């Protein structure tokens, strides 16, 4: 009875399901027909973007006809073609991106790590020891040879300017890259200048205040209050190096700080330019700086026939044209040249092994020993009277040539990470 009663119901439901399936199928075919009218152009565009070739245009050249979609089966195939093409294009893009990243990783060598150059501490110690001995050697009543050998401080002091330029370039430019560091580029020049100067100015001012009674007493006694105030202003403002005959007023050694301060003001503008130069360009820059520093000193020695003058062993009154000599000794412009030569030398070392540049030269004990013995030999031969070369030329000729080519720091290699 149940089967009899439910039979018509099931039959009706079966007929209704069949009708619904037929209607859904017809609607699906109609929708697919409309969607696939643009499926082929879309697939064609995808292939063109991915391969750079219009496959249908290429087929037409070979005598093939572009397919016509006149049946529902063809529309289904077109839809499948679009889906497959889209997936293939995305896969190709992913593979291309991964290959590009892999090639960049392989091509870019690890950037050398910046390390503290501890050798500079030793160099500074020996230079300072020599300069201090040179200032006080006369109190020991030395013989002629010892006096001439220890008092060549005007020659040695140039190394401090070169070291200052080297360290400034080392800390503000990139290793193995022709670029300045972001910190240098993003720091305004006045701020960069003040950060460097205030590394030594507070101590300079403190010493000046502590000893100002002594400086004032001597200046007021021999020159009067106006001159004493003027000298105090020059010393406090670190401007004395611009005045050749008064560069050593009050605290005499601070003429070095006066000249260095001017160089620090110029470095924020010079270092980004040097950082972009290749090794060949840096060598040309060093050569130009070398001749700029050499010519005025050569002119002084030629005009006054002062080829073998040892300033430390002579009385100031015995110096020919003392004002011109002091200008070339103290003037901040010449200090800037030595600072820039130190920066050039640093960049030559930092570009060792960079892209398009030669690798770092092999070094050994002789790389440091030979230049050191050469410098000592120059000092000794001048003291013996064998080498007739004035302080000015001794300071500029051997040292500046070495600094401009990077020879003097060839042993100071930059270590790679790990």
Image (spheres, grey):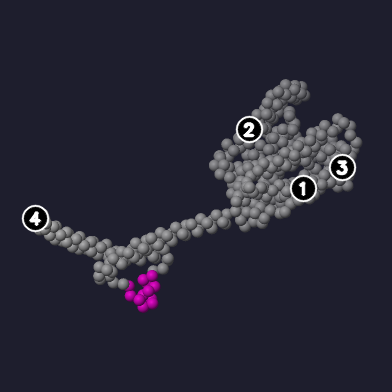
Question: Magenta stretch containing residue 59, yes or no?
Answer: yes
Task: Report if the CB atoms under discs 4 and 3 are less than 8 Å apart.
Answer: no
Q: How many marks?
A: 4
Q: Distance of mark 3 from mark 1, alpha carbons?
A: 23 Å
| Location of residue 385 by image quarter | top right
Which residue does the numbered mark 4 point to in the structure image? 1
Q: First in sequence, mark 2 or 4: give its number.
A: 4
Which mark identifies residue 368? 1
Q: Which of marks 4 and 3 is nearer the N terminus?
A: 4
The residue that disc 2 covers is 198
Q: Give the percent coordinates (x, y) of residue 228.
A: 71, 25
Q: Which one is nearer the viewer's eye here, 369 or 130?
A: 369
- Whether tag 2 and tag 4 are in contact, CB under 8 A, the answer is no
Residue 104 higher or lower than 195, as above or below: below
**Reading the chain from its start, which is encountered first: label 2 or label 3?**
2
The image position of residue 76, as x and y in percent, is 28, 66
The secondary structure type at the circle numbered 2 is loop
Counting residues from the N terminus, which is met first, the one under dot 2 or under dot 1?
A: 2
Badge 3 crowding class, 10 Å Cα cut-off, few under 14, some 14 to 19, many 20 or more, is: many
Q: Distance between the residues labelled 2 and 3?
A: 39 Å
Which portion, as a residue range, is magenta? 55-66
Separation (CA) of disc 2 from disc 4: 109 Å
SS under mark 3 = helix
Give the CA separation, mark 4 to mark 3. 137 Å
Q: Which residue is drawn at 42% across and 60% down?
A: 91
Mark 4 vs mark 1: give the one in front: 4
- Res. 345 in view: no
Query: On residue 383, which mark appears?
Result: 3
Say which label, 4 or 1, has the lower sequence index.
Answer: 4
Mark 2, residues whose alpha carbon is within 10 Å: few (<14), some, or many (≥20)? few
């Amino acid at each position: 009875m149940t089967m009899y009663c439910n039979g018509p119901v099931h039959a009706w439901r079966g007929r209704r399901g069949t009708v619904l399936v037929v209607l859904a199928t017809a609607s699906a075919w109609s929708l697919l027909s409309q969607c696939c009218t643009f499926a082929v152009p879309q697939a064609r565009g995808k292939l063109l973007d991915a391969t750079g070739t219009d496959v249908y245009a290429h087929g037409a050249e070979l005598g093939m006809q572009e397919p016509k979609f006149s049946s529902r089966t063809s529309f289904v195939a077109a839809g499948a073609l679009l889906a497959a093409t889209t997936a293939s294009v995305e896969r190709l893009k992913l593979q291309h991106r991964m290959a590009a990243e892999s090639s960049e990783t392989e091509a870019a060598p690890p950037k050398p790590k910046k390390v503290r150059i501890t050798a500079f501490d030793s160099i500074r110690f020996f230079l300072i020891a020599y300069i201090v001995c040179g200032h006080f050697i006369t109190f020991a009543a030395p013989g002629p040879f010892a006096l001439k050998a220890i008092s060549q401080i005007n020659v040695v002091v140039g190394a401090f300017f070169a070291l200052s330029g080297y360290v400034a370039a080392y800390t503000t430019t990139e290793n193995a890259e022709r670029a300045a560091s972001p910190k240098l580029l993003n720091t305004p020049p006045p701020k960069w200048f003040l950060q460097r100067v205030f590394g030594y100015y507070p101590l300079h001012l403190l010493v000046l205040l502590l000893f100002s009674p002594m400086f004032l007493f001597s200046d007021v006694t021999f020159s009067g209050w106006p001159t004493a105030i003027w000298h105090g202003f020059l010393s406090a403002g670190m401007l004395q190096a611009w005045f050749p005959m008064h560069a050593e007023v009050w605290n005499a050694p601070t003429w070095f700080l006066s000249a260095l301060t001017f160089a620090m003001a110029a470095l924020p503008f010079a270092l980004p330019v040097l950082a972009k130069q290749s090794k060949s360009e840096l060598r040309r820059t060093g050569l130009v700086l070398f001749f700029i520093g050499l010519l005025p000193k050569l002119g002084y020695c030629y005009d006054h026939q002062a080829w073998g003058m040892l300033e430390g062993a002579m009385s100031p009154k015995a110096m020919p044209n003392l004002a011109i000599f002091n200008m070339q000794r103290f003037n901040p412009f010449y200090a800037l040249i030595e600072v820039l030569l130190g920066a050039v030398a640093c960049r030559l070392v930092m570009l060792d092994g960079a892209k398009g540049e030669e690798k770092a030269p092999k070094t050994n004990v002789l790389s440091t020993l030979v230049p050191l013995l050469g410098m000592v030999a120059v000092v000794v031969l001048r003291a013996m009277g064998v080498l007739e070369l004035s302080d000015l030329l001794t300071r500029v000729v051997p040292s500046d040539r070495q600094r401009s080519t990077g020879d003097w720091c060839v042993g100071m290699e930059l270590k790679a990470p790990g």
